[in-house]
Amino acid sequence: MTGTPDLRATLRKLVMLFRRDLAIARSYRAAFILELFYALFGAASFYFLSKFIDSPQLQRSLPQGTTYFSFVLVGIAFFDYMSVALHTFDESLQNARQNGTLENLLVTQTSLPLILAGSSLYPFVLLSLRTTIYLGWGAALFGFPLRGANWFGAICILAASVLAFSGLGILSASYLLVFKRGNPVNWAVLGVSSVVGGMMYPVSVLPVWLQYLARLVPVTYSLEGMRAAVLGHASMRELWPPLAALLIFAAILLPVSFVTFSWALRRTKITGTLTHF
């Protein structure tokens, strides 16, 4: 009996946090129109770049044997989920500090995981809309293949990716909470991931030692799984290895990040520097 009211209260708080961020974003309505053109220009740039560098040798090195345009469009579109995860929690802390709601939010009976989840809800929904626009432009104008894709598998890979990436993002926010300025977690994770994660080129073209490093980065499994589902029409059985890897990353990173963030929060409360950024 108590489970249903608790669930309703949790959902209500998530909706309230989402509506807060949506209300802020609605004050910048022109940004949505600009986002449409930004996605079009991005997709067009990747398409014409692919025309320049496509070759039989390149196509043989691409997973699923697809075109470079399709390969890189998926890479760019879904790599952004890691970027958003690493920045959204930092930005949420900064915004709450600037508008004076940080301390009020933290003294409520709302759990810490719920606050973090609610604060990330709007950025991930907006990014999903942006990704849909990217793929839509690619399919409508530049021949990006949508038919035959395993969309259920893609959603599973995406959900597991968001969980794994969010663990990294909360660790990043923990660093910001304690040290206030300069966040090496962000640039280190994004820098390494952009080089070895397979965003712009297959992991197989890397030196062997970098291929081993790529296996320690969650975005590698995210992009491999997403390309297999969308471009390779892979079955759920075929998607299980990258999906399992992402779930393992999430199972490790999320508890560690929550414990780290709780410790960082207690420390800033003790030192009286909670709102000092």
Image (cartoon, helix red, strand yellow):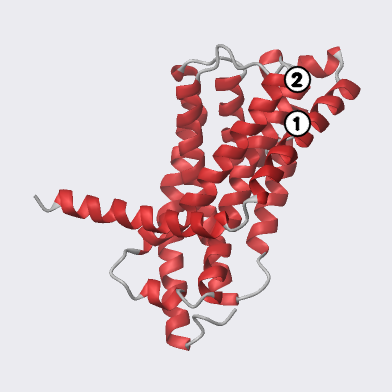
Give the residue at x 52% y 46%.
Answer: 124
Q: Nearer the viewer, residue 33 or 61?
A: 33
Residue 144 at x, y percent in the picture: 69, 19
* Amino acid beneath label 2: Phe
Residue 100 at x, y percent in the picture: 49, 78
Q: Residues within 10 Å of mark 1 (few under 14, many from 20)?
A: many
In three-dimensional space, the C-alpha distance between marks 2 and 1, rounded to whole angstroms, equals: 8 Å
Residue 215 appears in the picture as rendered: no
Residue 99 appears in the picture as rendered: yes
Give the residue at x 23% y 51%.
Answer: 8
In the rendered image, the vertical position of residue 120 relative to residue 64, given as above or below? below
* Amino acid beneath label 1: Ala
Provide the secondary structure element on which disc 2 rests: helix
Residue 98 sits in quarter:
bottom right
Which residue lies under the disc numbered 2?
A: 142
Which residue lies under the disc numbered 1?
A: 43
Provide the secondary structure element on which disc 1 rests: helix
Answer left or right for 83 relative to 43. Answer: left
Residue 44 at x, y percent in the picture: 80, 29
Answer left or right for 64 relative to 149. Answer: right
Residue 66 at x, y percent in the picture: 71, 15
Residue at far left of view: 1
Decide: marks 2, 1 in contact (CB < 8 A)? yes
Q: Nearer the viewer, residue 24 or 271?
A: 24
Give the residue at x 54% y 54%.
Answer: 168
Q: How many marks?
A: 2
Q: Earlier in the sequence, mark 2 or mark 1?
A: 1
